[in-house]
Image: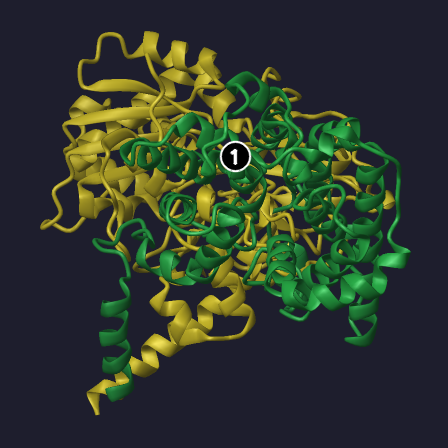
Amino acid sequence: MNPYILSATGPHIKAKTTTANAMRDVLVALIPITLVSVYFFRAYAIFLISVCLTTAVLTELLFRHYMKKKPTLRDGSALVTGLLVAMCFSATTSWWRGALATFIAVGIAKELMGGLGWNRFNPALFGRVAIILLAPWFVAINASLSPWSLNLGPVDVMTHATPLAMLQQGMSLPSYTTLFLGFPGGAMSEASVLAVLIGAAYLIYRKLINWRIPAAMLSTVFVFTLLLGKDPVYHLLTGGLMLGSFFMATDWVTSPINNRGKVAFGVLIGLSIVVFRVILAPTEGVAFSILIMNAFVPTIERLTRSRTFGHVKATSPLSRMVRTRESTAS
Amino acid sequence: MKSKTFRQGGHIPHFKSDTEHQPIVTLPVPERVIIPLSQHIGAPCDPLPDVRVGDRVTVGQPIGMGKGLCAPVHASVSGYIEAIEERPHVCNRNIMSIVIRREGDDTWNEVAGKGIDELSAQEIVDIIGQAGIVGMGGAGFPTRVKLSPPPNKHIDTLLLNGAECEPFLTSDHRYMLEHGEDVILGLKAAMKATAAQRAFIGIEDNKPDAIAHLQSLTAQDSNIAVVPLETKYPQGGEKQLIYSILRREVPTGGLPMDVGAIVQNIGTAVAISEAVKWRKPLIERVVTLGGPGVLQKGNYLVRIGTPLSYLLDKCGVERDCGVRVIVGGPMTGVVQSDLEAPVIKTTGGVLAFTPEFGRRTDAYSDCVRCGKCVEQCPMYLYPNDLGLLAEAERIGDLDRRHVLDCIECGLCSYVCPSNRPIVQFIKLAKPAVWAHRNRLATGSGR
C-alpha cells in the first residue's frame, strides 16, 4: 500500500463502530435470554455456557497458533459463537456434545474457512447441526463418557416436551402469553421469546443488524403457515425461529450484503422453514434452513445486485459474461 | 418545507458549532505571498512575459495566464517579485509559483463596472475569465469554461451548492449569511451567462439561518428557489445535489450539463458578483480554520498565497505537538507535508487535528461483510468488493464493477468496522484501471 495515499488522503475521521465493539454488543444483546436460561435451568445452564465459552476461546487460540496467524480473541467473535452454540442446546445436554459443537463451530466452520469474514456458514449453527448429523456416533461416545456426566440436581421443568413437538403430536399447547414470556422446553434460547426480542431491539437500536432479514423471515413463516391452515402465531413463538431470525440469519458474514439480497434471503429461509416444519422433521428446521441459504448467498447477491448510479442497468451475470468474452476476444 | 435528499449516503458528525456563528474576520496581509501557477483543474499558467524577478506588481494585476482549460492568476498583494520557482503546494508536490514580497498599499481599488442588465452573456463570461475565477468548492474547475457549455448542450437549470456537507467547514455558511446579496447577484450573473431559466439554491437543513436569509433575499425572484436539503453526507457532491433537487442522474462518465444543469459553489458566486460589480479578480477568499488543534477557530478572509504557517500562527496552533494539518474537509481533505504551502483559490478550510483525534490506530482486518459501505455508498457501488479487488490488483474486474464511478467521498473507509482503507485502495487502483482501458482501446484497433 502506498504510504502516502494511506496517511495523507481522507477520510481523517472514523465512525465509532468496530468489529470488536459490535461483537461486544451482540454479547450484551444475549444477556436477557442468558439470564432467563439461568433462571429456568440453574446450574445446568451456567455449566453448559461455561463449557462452550471456554471451548470457543481455546479452539480459536489452538487453531490460530497452529495456522501461524495472529490471535484475534480481542474481536470477541469466539465468545459470541460459543454463547450462541450453548443457546442452541437444551441445558441438560451432555457437556461433551456442547464442547464438540463449539470446537467444530470455531475451529472448522470459522478458522479453517479463513477466519472471521471468510466463513461461508454461520459457525454456531454449523456446529449445532454437525452434532445432529453426527448423532449415530454419540451412541458409543455417550456410553463411554457417561460416568463423567454431571448431575447438578433436579430441575423439574426439564420434563417438558418441546412446544414444536407438542404441536406436531397434537398435544394441547401452553398459551400464547406463556410461550411469549417464558416456557422452558427445547433449547435454552427457546425459553423466552420476549428475552430474545429485547436483545434484538438492542441490536437494531445499535444499527448492528438490518431489520429486513428478520422481517422477511417472520412474515414469510406467518403468511405460509396461515395459508397452510396452521396456527401462525404458535409457529412464530416456538422453536429457534426468533433467535434464528434476529441473531443467526442476520450474521454479517454469512448473509447477503445488499438490502434487496437481504429481503430475498429472509423470504427463502422462511419458505424453507415452513417446508421443514410442515413436511419434514419438526425440529431444527430453522438451523438447517439458514445453513442451506448461507450456501446460496453469493448467488442471491449476484442476482439482486443493484444498478450503479448513472448506469442504466445492473451488471447482471449474463451481460458480464458477454462482456468478458468480448474483452478476451480483443 | 420538507428537505430533499438523495438515496443512501450517511449521517456523520458535523463538528460545525465552533465556527458556524463566528463572523468573517479579515486576516492581516502577510509579508510574503506565494502564488502557484496551478490552482485549478487543467493546464497550469505561464508567468506573463513582463513579470520578472525584481519587478513591481500591484494588487490584482494578472501575473500568470494560460490557454484552454485554464484560469489566470493575479497578484494578491502589491510589492516586488522575489522569485519564480517551484514551491510547496497544498497538493503536496512542488509547483511553479510566483513569490511576492509585500510593499505598499494592498487595498483593491474598486472599478465600478456595468450592471448585469447592461452586460451581454459573453461579456459576463469574459469578466469571469479575466478575474481568474475557478470553482471554489475544491475541484477548481475554471468557471469561464463551465459557463460556456458547447452549443449542443441546453442548460435549463443553475444549481447553487450551499450544502457544505463536509464536517468542520463553515465558510460557505458565513458567505451566505454575510454576503447574501453577492451570492444572489453572482447567481443571476451565471444564469444570464448560461441562459438558464431557473435556479435552485440547495442548503443543508442544519443551516436554517442561511436558508431563511436567502429565502428573504429571493422573495421577489420567481425563478430562484431556496431548497432545504437533508443533512447527509455527501449532499454537496455534484451528482448527489443534482439528484436531490432535480431527480436527474448524471450518466456515468458524464457532466452535469448532460442533464441540463450547471452547479456553482457559494464562494464562487460571491467571487463572480465581486468581479461583475467591481472587476475584482479572485485575490482573497474565506477560509474556515478549525479542528481541535486550533485555539482561535473561525472564518477568516485570507489573501490567496498566504502560507499555511502564517495562518496557523495567527490562530494559535501549536505546531510542535504533532498536529496534522488538513487542507479541505476531514472526509476528502489532504494532510499537508509542508506548511509553507499557500492558501489557493480552492482552499475552503484548514484544519489542525491533534494526534489522537479521529484516528483508529489498529491495523485493518478482513472484511466482515457488515454491509455498511454498500448501504451508504452514494454511487450504489459495492465498496467492500472494490476494496478487495483493488487489494488483489484485479484491474479488469474493478472496471467491470464500475470503480471509475467512485466519487471518492470516503464514506466507505469512514464506516468500516474492520478499519479497511477502502477508498484509499480505490484511489490507488484507479490509474491502473484507466491504463487498462487505454490498452483495451488501442488493442482493439489493431
Three-letter amino acid code of the residue under disc 1: Met
Q: Position of residue A161 (x, y in %)?
A: 61, 36
Above or below — where is B27 with respect to B437? Answer: above
Q: Nearer the viewer, residue A293 or B375?
A: A293
Mark 1 closeness class: few <14, some 14–19, many ≥20 residues within 10 Å: some
Residue B384 seen by the camera:
yes
Q: Which chain is green?
A: A
Residue B105 seen by the camera:
no
Q: Nearer the viewer, residue A225 or A185?
A: A185
Q: Tell whether A29 sits left or right of B23.
A: right
Callout 1: helix, strand or loop?
helix
Callout 1: chain: A
Q: Residue, x 26% and y 8% (percent of image)?
A: B219
Q: Tell whether A231 sits left or right of A86.
A: left
Quadrant in the picture for the C terminus of chain A: bottom left
Above or below — where is A197 with respect to A130? Answer: above
Q: In the rendered image, which quarter is residue A25 located in?
A: top right
Q: Position of residue B80 (x, y in %)?
A: 61, 48
Q: Position of residue B37 (x, y in %)?
A: 49, 56
Q: Position of residue A135 (x, y in %)?
A: 64, 62
Q: Residue, x 69% and y 34% (percent of image)?
A: A159
Colour convention of the picture: by chain
Q: In the rendered image, which quarter is residue A303 located in?
A: bottom left
Q: Nearer the viewer, residue B260 or A33?
A: A33
Q: Residue, x 64% and y 48% (percent of image)?
A: B417
Q: How many marks?
A: 1
The residue singled out by tag 1 in the image is A166
Q: Which colour represents chain B?
A: yellow
Quadrant in the picture for the N terminus of chain A: bottom right
Q: Residue furthest bottom?
A: B446
Q: In the rendered image, which quarter is residue B399 located in?
A: bottom left
